[in-house]
Image (cartoon, rainbow, N blue to C red):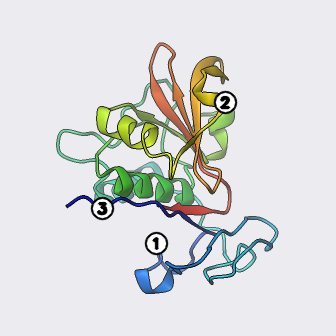
Amino acid sequence: GLDVWSKIECHANPTTAPFASQSDRNVGGSNVVTGGTGTGTNPGGGVRAGEAQSRGTYTHAQAVSALQRAGVCGGSVPCFAPQSDGASLAGVRVQTIEQIIELHKGCECQFTVTSAVRPSGAHATGYKVDVRINAALDRYIETTPSIFAVQNGGRRISWGGQMAVIYKDSCGTVYAREYGSQPHWDIEAIRGSLCLY
């Protein structure tokens, strides 16, 4: 059968493993944690942002390896296919790759990262990645309102010089479906939180 997930948990950057084990996750309660200041709601347990340590960044090879190990890519689906000069996975945040892995787990599909860290602009921080569109990923984000809330009534808005429809998960991670000359998903992880679908 097909299981439907309708719960999202937000955790500060985990320090012991990329994802909490099922016994460590408070499946029945709220687990929303905000990042940066060590404050936030945490009635059900989990890691508070103030207790979490920075997980740092990956080299290009480390990021590709993490994506391959998780099954995000492989076989005929490349892990990284740059859509612009200077784009690389070097310097991408560990948290950002973990969020992409979580997206892969939710959609049960493979996809390709086309841009991550660029020398300047919004992608310079390592919290944003661009992902090539594909039918399974599009369907998952666009038709799972219990996880991804469409913004602005689903209207296309100006987003980084292109038109995009914006979705957000309950942790605030942004999924912008861009419609420019190279359509893709522009995904921005929220600093200090990992959203588990």
Compared to 31, does 156 lie above or below? above
- Mark closer to the chain start, 1 or 2: 1
Pointers 3 and 1 in contact (C-beta within 8 Å): no
Between residue 32 and residue 185, name the one nearer to us: 32
Q: Residue at x 60, y 18 (%)?
A: 162
Residue designated by label 3: 3
x and y percent of residue 58 in the render?
51, 56
Q: Which residue is mark 1?
A: 19
Tell me the amino acid under the disc marked 3.
Asp
Mark nearer the viewer, 1 or 2? 2
Q: Name the residue tied to disc 2.
A: 152
Is 191 rendered above or below residue 132?
A: below
Please tell me in which quadrant of the rendered image residue 30 appears.
bottom right
Mark 3: which secondary structure? loop
Distance from the alpha carbon under mark 3 to that under mark 1? 20 Å
Q: Is residue 85 above or below residue 24?
A: above
x and y percentages locating residue 144 in the rendered image: 44, 46
What's the mark number on residue 60? Answer: none
Report whether residue 120 is seen: no
Please report the residue visible at 67 percent of the width from the left and 30 percent of the height from the top. 152
**What amino acid type should be assigned to the residue bearing mark 2?**
Asn
Using the image, determine if residue 132 lies above or below residue 5.
Answer: above
Q: Is residue 83 left or right of residue 72?
A: right
Closest to the observer, 52 or 23: 23
3D distance between C-alphas at marks 1 and 2: 32 Å
Helix, strand or loop under label 1: loop
Amino acid on which disc 1 is placed: Phe
Whichever of labels 3 and 2 marks the residue nearer the N terminus, that label is 3
Q: Quadrant of the N terminus?
A: bottom left
